[in-house]
Image: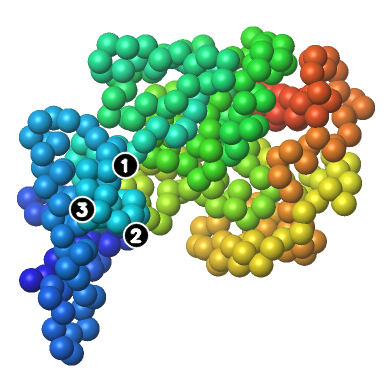
Amino acid sequence: MLVVFANRKKKTTPTEDNEEPPTGPTSVHAFPRKSGSSKPHLNGPNLAAFIKTVELILDGLRGNVVATKRDLFYRSVKLFGKQARVDAIVEDIAATLQVRREDLNIVAAPKGLFAGHIEIFTKDGKSVKPGDNGALIPPSVAIERIACDNVKWVLVVEKEAVFQSLCAPAFLQDTMGSLHGVLLTGKGYPDLSTRELIKRLSDDYPSVPILCLVDADPHGLEILATYKHGSASLAFDRANLAVPSIEWIGVKGTEWDALRIPRDELLPLTKADRTKALKLLKREGLPDEWRRELSYMLHLQRKAEIQVLSTATRSAGTSATPAAGPASSCVLFEYLASKIAAHCAPKT
């Protein structure tokens, strides 16, 4: 028995007439193992897990029931053994069939958050408005429409802790005033629902700048690259996920001196950081600015988290009135307000 999977890390192109499935790199797995065979072995437990996953997907499609990958795992914990096995099988099936995961009625558990001047209407007739701490981003398959007509900017933040600081009225209302915007976070490396919402915002509101705030380290740039260019693991679905227009506004290593951040507040690059940086530098199509920033980090052997702004000195020339709250928040608010205003200014 042979099971042939499309390679989901390679983008395949459908034929023009769409009469035949697209061709591209594949992965062939044999069952059972044959002596001398060079094909990867699909052993008994993996085959059983594959068949069970297909069965659960078909049941959901017949009953029009949407499930999370976590739901699938808990329906047969002993068989699957670990969540990663279910995740890989679902993604392989979607790539092989050249469909999106949501077309299989499979979604990820909610992870990302949104806040600001936005309202999401779901297909079951409900309205989701973010509270003071934001709200979970619904799966894209459940979203009917989005209302954020008066929004001037969208800011994607790497970390939830920073996102929660920005949710405060001191930033959204006092600092930004009438310059209404939307905040989003994928809590680190983003899930599909977060990426799909950002993609939808970029398509529905093309004149609104989408900005990104990440740590000044190689992993922050990898997260930025995931939003902008898509991830290798879902390369086949890049057209539905990547947001080429997203712009990186910080934090950047070349700003450390201008912000007067003490060098002893910077963190040393780890071996994993250096490996990630060198790998990114070899990537084709990497923007020149990203290369300069990575090279600067490697030269100094230093990195910084967004929270390093708490040690920055407030600009003496700023005219912004600091909002009530910790001084570190004021510096962050002013830093972002300046960046956002610059991107919202009319192009000359």
What's the CA distance linking mark 2 and mark 1? Answer: 22 Å
- Circle 3 packing at 10 Å, graded few (<14), some (14-19), many (20+), is many
Residue 93: numbered disc: 3
On-image quarter of the C terminus: top right
Q: Is residue 26 visible?
A: yes
Q: Which amino acid does label 1 sit on?
A: Arg
Residue 326: numbered disc: none
Residue at x 55% of width, y 57% of height: 286
Q: Mark 2 points at which residue?
A: 9
> Under tag 2, what secondary structure?
loop
On-image quarter of the N terminus: bottom left
Residue at x 77% of width, y 49% of height: 254
Between 339 and 81, the residue placed more toward the observer is 81
Please, is residue 161 above or below residue 128 in the view?
Answer: below
Labels 3 and 2: the sequence-earlier one: 2
Residue 344 falls left or right of residue 241:
right
Q: What residue type is labelled 3?
A: Ile
Labels 3 and 1: the sequence-earlier one: 1
Q: Mark 1 points at which residue?
A: 70
Please, is residue 23 above or below residue 240 in the view?
Answer: below
Please, is residue 25 above or below residue 170 in the view?
Answer: below
